[in-house]
Image: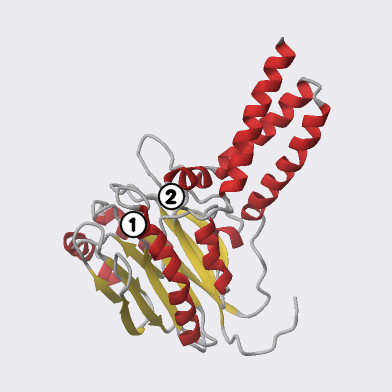
Amino acid sequence: MIRLFVTVLGLLALAVGAAGLVARYLPVTNDVVLVVAAAAPYLTVASLIALFMFVIARRWVLTIVAAPLCVVMIAVQLPRFIGPEKVGVPSVAVRVVTANLGFGSADPRAVTEMASTTADVLVIQELTPEAATGLSSAGLDATFPYRVLNPGASSSGIGVWSRYPIIDSARIDGYQMPMLRARIQIPGVMFPTSVVAVHLAAPWVQSLHYFRDDLAHFPVTLREVSREAGSGAVIVAGDFNSTLDMQPFRKLLAEGYRDAGEQAGAGLTLTYPSKSWRRPVVGIDHVLVYNCSASTAQTVALPGSDHRGLATVIDVPVDPTASYPVV
C-alpha cells in the first residue's frame, strides 16, 4: 500500500514537472499557461521529487521515464547560473539600472542613493510627475545631468537619466504605454549607444490581449533599433512583465539580443512582487543587450515600490568594427 501511495505521489509530481516544461514552449493564450510558465523554475523541483519517489517505490520503468525529464528541466535552467561570458575585446564598463517605481510610490531619496552608487544610466518606469519632482529634489538630476523624461499618471510614465551626454532621443509609440529611445555618447566608445526604456503591458488586471499584442509587436521595434544603431551597442531596459520562461519573451532574443541576467550567470534575478516581508517570486524586469555584453546583474531594493530594481554592468566595445585577437 505504501509503495502504491508513493507511486501515485510520484506520478502527480511528474505531471506537475512536465506541465512546467511544456508551458515554456506554448504561446501565452490564457492565464493557466502564463502562471505555469512563470513557475517553471520552481516546477523543476517537482520532477526531482518524482524521480526520488519512483526510486523509493522501486518503479524502475517510471524512474527511466522521469530521469530524462529531470535532465531536460535542469538543462533549460542551467545557463542562468553559468557565467559571465568573456568578451575578449577592449570595452568600457557601463552600469545600467532599471527601476519600476510602483505607480511612483518608491522613496525618491532611496532611489537616488541607490542610483548614485550603482548606475551610470538609470531607466525608470511608472514615473509620475510627482515622482519626477521628488527625484529631482532628492538630487538625482545633479548626479545624472542628462535625461529624457516622459512622466505620466499611474503607470504610464517613463524616463532615462544618464551621466553621459544624450545626443538625441525619441518617443516610441504603438504600445499600451509609451517608451523612449535615447542615444548616449559614452566616453572612449566610438559609436553612440542606443538605450531603449521599456514598459510592456501587464498580463493581469486587464485583458491578456494587451500583453500578447505588445510582445508580438516588440520584435519589430528591436529590429528597427538595432538597424538604426548600426555597429553601435543597444541596451534595452525596463519592465517586460514577462519572464525568461515565457515563450513570447524568448522570441525577443531571436532578434540577436541577449538577456543580461542569463548572460552574466546571475540566476533567476527575481524582481516582482517585492514586499518588505517576503522575497519576490518572478523576474519580469530585464536588461537586453545587442553588440555588447553583460558581465554582472543583481537585484536592488526600491523601498516603497512593488518591484526590485535590476542593476547590471554592460561591457560596451570601444570599437566593434575592429579585428581583435580571439581570447
Q: What residue sits 45% from the left and 52% below the top?
A: 29
Secondary structure at badge 2 equals loop
Q: Nearer the viewer, residue 55 or 110?
A: 55
Q: Which quadrant is the N terminus positioned in?
A: top right
Q: Is residue 239 visible?
A: no
Q: Is residue 55 visible?
A: yes
Q: Residue 180, relative to residue 78: is it above or below?
A: below
| Residue at which label 1 appears | 100
Counting from the top left corner in percent of width and height, residue 264 is at 59, 60
> Distance of mark 2 from mark 1, alpha carbons?
10 Å
Q: Residue 146, relative to residue 299: is it above or below?
A: below
Q: How is the image coloured?
A: secondary structure
Q: Residue 16, relative to residue 180: is it above or below?
A: above
Q: What residue sits 49% from the left and 53% below the top?
A: 243
Counting from the top left corner in percent of width and height, residue 184 is at 40, 81
Q: Nearer the viewer, residue 191 or 116?
A: 191
Counting from the top left corner in percent of width and height, residue 279 is at 43, 39
Q: Which quadrant is the C terminus positioned in?
A: bottom right
Q: What residue sits 58% from the left and 69% below the top?
A: 254
Mark 2 vs 1: CB contact within 8 A: yes
Q: What residue sits 67% from the left and 29% below the top?
A: 49
| Residue at which label 2 appears | 271
Q: Nearer the viewer, residue 320 or 180?
A: 180
Q: Amino acid at mark 1?
A: Asn
